[in-house]
Amino acid sequence: EVQLAQSGAEVKKPGESLKISCKASGYRFTNYWIGWVRQMPGKGLEWMAIIYPGDSDTRYNPSFQGQVTISADKSITTAYLQWSSLKASDTAMYYCARRPGYYFDLWGQGTLVTVSS
Amino acid sequence: QSVLTQPPSVSGAPGQRVTISCTGSSSNIGAGYDVHWYQQLPGTAPKLLIYGNNNRPSGVPDRFSGSKSGTSASLAITGLQAEDEADYYCQSYDSSLSGYVFGTGTKVTVL
């Protein structure tokens, strides 16, 4: 089955680091870009970053550049999104999604990140 | 920082037709980039509904259709059903951002 399986919910304190994951299965991981999309509570969708696992080429939304790091390990067909120092404003649901064209056709189930002191 | 504008909400009775507009600019829809649509049911991940302006992925009912003209696009839902109650987002590519942009989102309510 073609799917993206994300890591579980996280509760962190401000200033802590975090790395969430997105495990791909059922298709050739290195042939598709994978992106991350943020959805803050009660809000809309925002594209954050995207990576091509075949050569690790990455692109960032300027609003998130320097705030997060996207990476991928093609040996275990997994993409990651990481923060070095979380803020309360990072509290949101984060989705990974596969990009076959200029759209996202396959989505993970989401990872809820809560940042609170 | 959505650059695609959608109405916050639309509603209709079962069986009716509703449309959702998506207004962009010369750096995204008006530049010729395709528009795509997603459906997000309550508490779930978004699902691709329409890609490439008017193409439906396998499994999406033909009650859903898309169109694009100039700097805008529309999603139409005909024969509205209770299960269509969800949030809908348009999406395109923006050359100024060099990235992907989503619409502000529209909540569809079935009366």
Image (cartoon, coloured by chain):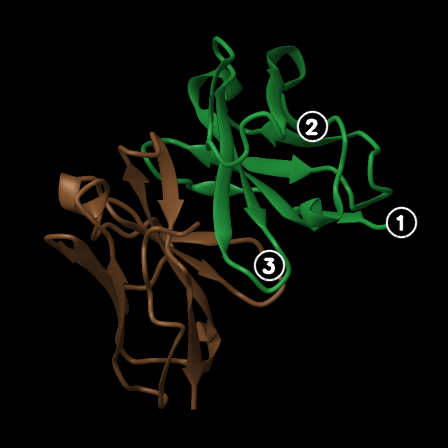
| Colour that chain A carries in the picture | green
Image quarter for residue B18? bottom left
Report the amino acid beneath label 1.
Ser
Chain to which mark 3 belongs: B
Task: Return the residue at label 3.
Answer: B44
Going 43% across and 85% down the picture, which residue do you hit? B110
| Colour that chain B carries in the picture | brown
Q: Which residue is the extreme one toward the left?
A: B70
Which one is in front, A62 or B45? A62
x and y percentages locating residue B47 in the rendered image: 46, 53
Report the amino acid beneath label 2.
Gln
Marks 1, 3: nearer the viewer? 1
Task: State the separation of the CA atoms marked 1 and 3.
Answer: 27 Å
x and y percentages locating residue A35 in the rendered image: 50, 32
Report the amino acid beneath label 3.
Thr
- Check the image and report above or below for A100 versus B76: above
Q: Tag 1 or tag 2, which sits nearer the N-term?
A: 2
Task: State the separation of the CA atoms marked 2 and 1.
Answer: 19 Å
